[in-house]
Amino acid sequence: MALASESRHGLWSGRWLFVLAAAGSAVGLGNIWKFPYIAGENGGGAFVLIYLVCVAAVGIPIMMSEVMLGRAGRASPINAMRTLSAKANASKLWSYVGWMGVAAGFLILSYYTVIAGWALNYVWLTVQGAFEGISSDSAARVYADLLADPLQMIMWQTIFVALTIWIVGKGVTKGLEMAVRIFMPVLFVLLIVLLVYGFNSSGFDQGLAFMFDLKFDAVTPQTWLIALGQAFFTLSLAMGAMMAYGAYVPEGTNIGSTVVVIALLDTVVAVSAGLAIFPIVFANGLEPSQGPGLMFVTLPLAFGQLPLGAVFGTVFFVLVSFAAITSAISLMEPALAYLVEEYNAKRKRVAVSLGVICWALGLGTVFSFNIWAESYIVGELNYFGFIDYVSQNIMLPLGGMFIAIFAVWVVPKDILKKQLGLRKGWQTLLWKFVGGVVAPLGVLAVFVSIILPLFVG
Ligand code: PHE
């Protein structure tokens, strides 16, 4: 069985298109509402250093593994794992690693589209100047009203899902590539605009100190787990996304150096997001926070108090929406590619079917904020909490670990050498040590520390 040099879905038009697409997948809500705050809370500059170690020692090797497996298999994650395990005469069970990634990505997509819908709603609100001069109570009320109104949420979720279907349905070149060609440069420009705005605000020094002062006394073993979990999520690992995108990487592209560029871009955006957001928050004497509270209450409130706040607030929510759409398309692509391959089906049709299923699954998330808020599936996890927990805390670490093990120890040597361009003995040794030992053990540590407390109590 020869390995294909083309995928039936097409190829990226060049190395830089792949970089843009993969960075589009990586840069998302995780960079904007999570990284800045967890960095500030968990040691500032000390956290940033630990995070960089996690990206280098675990994130980059696993991303390289995914891209390499995708390119070697030239198919969706499930079929790539199938082909490669057959080539290696290894167990068929390896294809389940592909399945798990595709499933995790799809589950995450189902709620990602709901939250991205909120961002669209906020674009609409900021354009109208809805937050100008608003009080903190009113800002909190706007958000609470949205969450209490399923129909409103469903409307925005529907728009976002439709947009995702439309882009993904058009294919690799005309859909995915077109989207990242437009959205990513705009995203970078908007981020720079916000950075300049933050730089000129009176809270810049405080924002800088919050994120970068070296607070080593805040560092505990827990900090490493948080950093590693963040690295995983933000680099879009173990969700099939990078493997699916890897299948479209042209032969001549050097995987190692390209992946390093993608990880760097993602980190630069995460740090810049913090430097754009926190000065604005501090300039208003507000407390930093994270997650939806930061994005949908604190920031609208802060923008509402500043000169030209309506303009820059709109800029911010457009940026968030763009970041989310380029991530969402990468979450749909793995399942879509698989169905197209398996049933020889038309891309557009599959996109619509998958979109509808994802939309329906997302309704559970919509209701988790209102009518089902206290319907618990296990413990204190409602529908949204459960999907989020299972996909992020169980499927991701397990998937990541197996992907690295497969890529380093199972894939036949000739494929490995060719894909990664390993020429010298030390390169192979480094790959085996970091990719095959450090990365899986690092992930295992996270997994055990999440799972163990469930049993030990
Ligand atoms: N990396 C994205 C973020 O930071 C989330 C994501 C995960 C996107 C997996 C695609 C695949 O928000």
Image: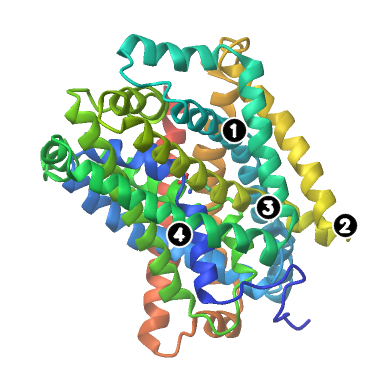
Assess whether mark 3 and mark 1 are in contact (beta carbons under 8 angstroms): no
Quarter holding residue 29: top left
Q: Is residue 136 above or below residue 115?
A: above
Q: Amino acid at mark 3?
A: Ile
Residue under the point 66% across and 24% down: 154
Pointers 4 and 1 in contact (C-beta within 8 Å):
no
Q: Can residue 153 be seen?
A: yes
Q: Position of residue 290 (x, y in %)?
A: 34, 30
Name the residue beneath numbered marker 1: 111
Helix or strand or loop: what does disc 1 sit on? Answer: helix
Question: Which numbered disc flags the more N-terminal residue, 3 or 4?
Answer: 3
Q: Which quadrant would the N terminus be assigned to in this image? A: bottom right
Q: Which residue is mark 4?
A: 185
The residue where tag 2 is placed is 345
Q: CA distance from mark 4 to mark 2?
A: 33 Å
Mark 1 within 8 Å of ligand 1, using the beta carbon: no
Secondary structure under badge 4? helix
